[in-house]
Image (tube, helix red, strand yellow):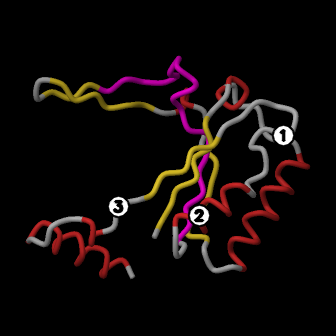
Amino acid sequence: MRFMIIVKATAASEAGQMPEASLLAAMGAYHEELAKAGVLLDATGLQPSSKGWRVKYSGGKRTVIDGPFTDTKELIAGYTLIQVRSRDEAMEWARRVPAPFGEQADGEIEVRQLFELEDFEPGPEIEQFRKLEESRR
């Protein structure tokens, strides 16, 4: 089972404020524990939305919208992707995430389970994804 631990953005992260060294050390130690346990798949922080864009789909058309985006609570500042045996194990790892913006600052993480190919009905479309996944390995 794969889970994404999502760090929700704040006004400070959207302003490009870099984390303090102590927070980087805590995050590094946490991710090192994940790696040693063999559950870490990927992790990184994201640049502010001012350096990104969105593609809006409506009425068969695509519109590119440059950042920044104003609704900070809906933005992602970073993520950690883990693969574990159960939802409970994912929850235990999530409880150990260091406070994303420091112990005294407000912050929030969200944890979401990823779909696996086995979650879908078998068919040629799913086989296409399975072949793609195998070729990446």
Q: Can you give x and y, in whole percent of width and height, for residue 126 in the image?
A: 17, 69
Left or right, residue 88 beside residue 54: right
In the rendered image, which residue does mark 1 sit on?
102
| Residue 115, numbered circle | 3
Question: Is 37 covered by the magenta stretch?
Answer: no
Nearer mark to the viewer, of 3 and 1: 3
Nearer mark to the viewer, of 2 and 1: 2
Left or right, residue 103 beside residue 12: right
In the rendered image, which residue does mark 2 sit on?
90
Up the image or down, 43 lies above or below 6; here it is below
Q: Quadrant of residue 133?
A: bottom left
The span shown in magenta is 64-83
Q: Which residue is at the front of the view, 86 or 39? A: 86
Q: CA distance from mark 3 to mark 2?
A: 15 Å
Nearer mark to the viewer, of 3 and 2: 2
Disc 2 or 1, which lies upstream in sequence?
A: 2
Q: Can you give x and y, in whole percent of width and height, for residue 62 in the image?
A: 21, 29
Residue that protrudes farthest toward the top in the picture: 70
| Residue 69, numbered circle | none
Name which residue lies at 55% across and 69% down: 41
